[in-house]
């Protein structure tokens, strides 16, 4: 994970959270990474990290380097955008798509899910749970293949 846009070429960005065969370590490292990402985005800093998983195909594939910018105005978020957020009620961090925008007793919420067909809805977010928006995806192969 790299803070600030374009500090490291995507080919050199490795996913230090991948530990084949050690699920507990992988979960612990991903939680640590997610907390760092949240802290950076809420400090108005951009974040670059290598994505894992294919739930956002065809926009983001596993191994792609993603660039996230802080959300400064939640009212500009639209259906189809990919946001980095803490999904309710599971309290899990995701980079996932906005599928709908609604109102619950005067408070705006965004329904969040993947891009599969049919999509799986992970839950919802209020403004205080959405930290970043996907700005760029680089499909550059990693210099060090951490996925074998």
Image: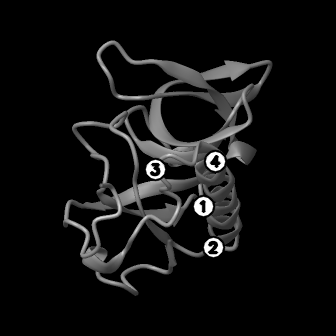
Q: Earlier in the sequence, mark 3 or mark 4?
A: 3
State the CA–CA distance, disc 3 to disc 4: 11 Å
- Tell me where residue 145 sits by quadrant: bottom left
Q: Earlier in the sequence, mark 2 or mark 3?
A: 3
Q: Secondary structure at mark 3?
A: loop
Q: Residues within 10 Å of mark 2 (few under 14, many from 20)?
A: some
Q: Residues within 10 Å of mark 3 (few under 14, many from 20)?
A: few
Name the residue rendered at 46%, 62% in the picture.
68
Q: Secondary structure at mark 4?
A: helix
Q: Is residue 98 above or below residue 42?
A: above
- Tell me where residue 103 sits by quadrant: top right
Viewer-closest of 41 and 16: 16
Viewer-closest of 132 and 90: 90
Name the residue rendered at 71%, 67% in the picture.
39
Q: Which mark is residue 20?
A: 3
Mark in the foreground, 1 or 2: 2
Q: Residue furthest top?
A: 118
Mark in the foreground, 3 or 1: 3
> Can you identify the residue that label 4 sits on?
27
Can you give x and y, in whole percent of width and height, for residue 90 in the image? 72, 28
Q: Residue furthest bottom?
A: 7
Q: Earlier in the sequence, mark 4 or mark 2?
A: 4
- Asked if the residues shown at circle 1 and circle 2 are in contact, with their CB atoms under 8 angstroms apart, the answer is yes
Q: Residues within 10 Å of mark 4 (few under 14, many from 20)?
A: some
- Asked if the residues shown at circle 4 and circle 2 are in contact, with their CB atoms under 8 angstroms apart, the answer is no
Q: Secondary structure at mark 2?
A: loop
């Amino acid at each position: 994970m790299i803070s600030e846009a374009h500090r490291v070429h995507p080919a050199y960005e490795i996913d230090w959270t991948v530990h084949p065969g050690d699920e507990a370590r992988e979960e612990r490292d991903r939680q640590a990474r997610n907390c760092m990402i949240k802290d950076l985005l809420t400090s108005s800093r951009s974040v670059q990290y290598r994505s894992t998983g294919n739930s956002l195909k065809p926009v983001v594939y596993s191994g792609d380097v993603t660039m996230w910018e802080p959300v400064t105005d939640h009212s500009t978020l639209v259906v189809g955008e990919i946001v980095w957020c803490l999904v309710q009620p599971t309290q899990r961090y995701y980079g996932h798509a906005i599928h709908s925008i609604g109102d619950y007793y005067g408070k705006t919420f965004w329904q969040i899910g993947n891009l599969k067909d049919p999509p799986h809805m992970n839950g919802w977010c209020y403004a205080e749970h959405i930290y970043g928006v996907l700005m760029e995806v680089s499909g550059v192969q990693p210099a060090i293949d951490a996925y074998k």
